[in-house]
Image: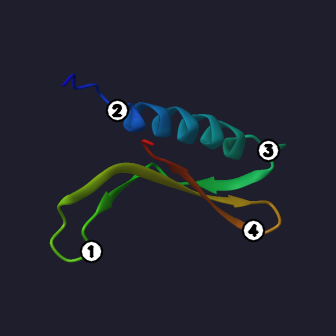
Amino acid sequence: MSESFAYCDYIANQISNALFEDASKETGLLRWVTKPKLDLHPEKGYMLSTKKTVNVLDINGKNYLVTVEEV
């Protein structure tokens, strides 16, 4: 069986950085963007999966959750 790497970290970082760039502009449509968050066990803190999430707030106050996960 061949193992392959999942690039969830890289992809989530690229998305977060691009969205953060928009939020940094005065004319951007976004207010804030988080760095990617890990999918961790809520109590013990160990990694559950390679899934990453990015929270985004737009200029109208709507929240978004961008998810990158291996399928």
Q: Residues within 10 Å of mark 1 (few under 14, many from 20)?
A: few
Residue 27, compared with residue 47, is above or below; it is above
Q: Which of the two discs, 4 and 3, sits closer to the camera?
A: 4
Q: Residues within 10 Å of mark 4 (few under 14, many from 20)?
A: few
Mark 2 to mark 4: distance in Å? Answer: 30 Å
Mark 2 to mark 1: distance in Å? Answer: 22 Å
Where residue 18 is drawn, which disc sits there?
A: none
Labels 2 and 1: the sequence-earlier one: 2
Mark 3 to mark 1: distance in Å? Answer: 34 Å
**Helix or strand or loop: what does disc 3 sit on?**
loop
What amino acid is found at the position of numbered circle 2 in the picture?
Answer: Ala
What amino acid is found at the position of numbered circle 3 in the picture?
Answer: Gly
Q: Position of residue 15 (x, y in %)?
A: 57, 37
Pointer 3 with pointer 1, Cβ within 8 A = no
Where residue 28 is drawn, which disc sits there?
A: 3
Q: Position of residue 1 (x, y in %)?
A: 18, 25
Q: Quadrant of residue 20?
A: top right
Labels 4 and 3: the sequence-earlier one: 3
Where residue 62 is drawn, which disc sits there?
A: 4
Q: Which of the two discs, 2 and 3, sits closer to the camera?
A: 2
Pointer 2 with pointer 1, Cβ within 8 A = no
Where residue 42 is drawn, which disc sits there?
A: 1
Q: Which of the two discs, 3 and 1, sits closer to the camera?
A: 1
What residue sits 52% from the left and 32% below the top? Answer: 14
